[in-house]
Image (spheres, rainbow, N blue to C red):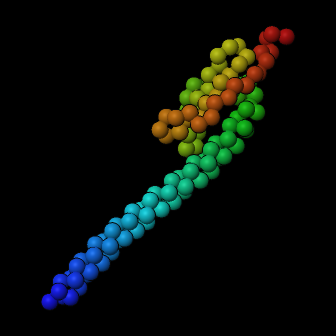
Amino acid sequence: MLSGDRNGAVLLEVVVALTILSTVGALLIGNAWLWHRATERARQSEADLRVASAFMESATLWTRNELDQRLGERTQGPWRLRIDRSFQSLYVLALIDAQRHVLIRTAVFREDPNDE
């Protein structure tokens, strides 16, 4: 009868070990999935920032008249574009995402033709 008790104890140890292994395995798979999602979000965020940067690069080429026509904040594709003139010849451009975070901000100088 003692060997039956020992077999029961071994079976219990195996069940406990399998439970621990399956719990650890599930946690590892869950963490791997979270890391995968975080990596995908980072890749998407980087791609979005590249597109925003390309737009901002083209916006910095606008003339003084074009900048003056766009003063204030307006929708620009998936973003909000804010253009302020902080001094007579200095414009500050900011590209803002849907969560109201500034993605890119830059300043451009456009000489005032009246200052010649």
Position of 99 compared to 115: left or right? left
Residue 71 lies, in percent from the top left, at 61, 24
Depicted 100 relative to depicted 49: above or below: above
Depicted 52 relative to depicted 14: above or below: above
Q: Residue at x 43, y 64 (%)?
A: 28
Residue 60 lies, in percent from the top left, at 73, 32
State whether residue 104 appears in this view.
yes
Residue 41 lies, in percent from the top left, at 53, 52
Q: Residue at x 52, y 35 (%)?
A: 101
Q: Check the image and name the residue furthest to the right.
A: 116
Position of 84 compared to 13: left or right? right
Q: Residue at x 64, y 30 (%)?
A: 105
| Residue 108, quarter of the rendered image | top right
Residue 55 lies, in percent from the top left, at 68, 41
Total numbered labels placed on residues in the image = 0
Depicted 12 relative to depicted 60: above or below: below
Q: Check the image and name the residue furthest to the top.
A: 115
Q: Residue at x 70, y 43 (%)?
A: 54
Position of 15 compared to 47: left or right? left
State whether residue 75 appears in this view.
no
Q: Quadrant of the C terminus?
A: top right
In-front residue for pair 9/102: 9
